[in-house]
Image (tube, rainbow, N blue to C red):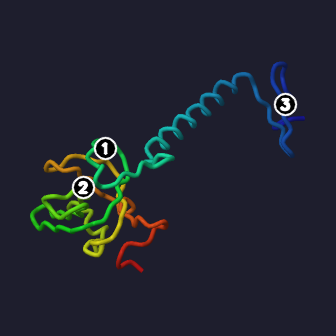
Amino acid sequence: MGARGCEPRPGNEKRETGNVDLVWSDSMRPATLLVIIALIVAATAVRAQVPRHPAHELIVPDSAAKDHLDEMVTVEGTVVSVEISEAAPSRVFLHFGAPPPNQTFSALIVGPVLPRFPNLQEWRGKRVRVTGLVRLEEGRPTMRLTKPSQLRGAAWYVFPAPGSP
């Protein structure tokens, strides 16, 4: 005898699962299929919201950043100067290639996200990689950084930010 005394009717399948027999009716199949499709759609939507780096990250030198406007890339170079602007909103530029106004590329950190980036002065002279969208700002190729993970050392291994334990 099946679960709760139900016997399978013609057209229904009876499946034994240990102590309880499950009876699947033809009317349950479309509902089950709809639930599965809804779960797949929901999982796809959530996955689409998670930013992912391309499998083969495009790494360009700071001198070539101007050739990759409006592209998600990783720019590699040496930070030659760190410019701190106290004007509202406060901004910090990490300049690459040469000091301003001749820099080849700049990484920009603005306002409320600045506390996420401690010890920015210590990046001066370091070879780094920054990942994000390259845009023109004040006529120069610039990338806005919002997360510390966008800024990292460019050695063969990723070393921690200067001043961190």
The kind of residue tagged 1 is: His
N-term mark: 2 or 3:
3
Examine the image and state in which quarter residue 147 appears: bottom left
Say which residue label 1 marks: 68
Quarter holding the C terminus?
Answer: bottom left
**What residue lies at 49% left-to-right and 47% top-to-bottom?**
56
N-term mark: 1 or 3:
3
Q: Position of residue 113 (x, y in %)?
A: 27, 62
Say which residue label 3 marks: 14
Measure the alpha-carbon separation of dots 1 and 2: 11 Å
Would you say 93 lies left or right of 52 here? Answer: left
For residue 58, which numbered disc appears in the image? Answer: none
Image marks 1 and 2: residues in contact by CB distance under 8 Å: no
Q: Residues within 10 Å of mark 2 (few under 14, many from 20)?
A: many
Q: Nearer the viewer, mark 2 or mark 3?
A: 2
**What residue lies at 45% left-to-right and 49% top-to-bottom?**
57
Say which residue label 2 marks: 105
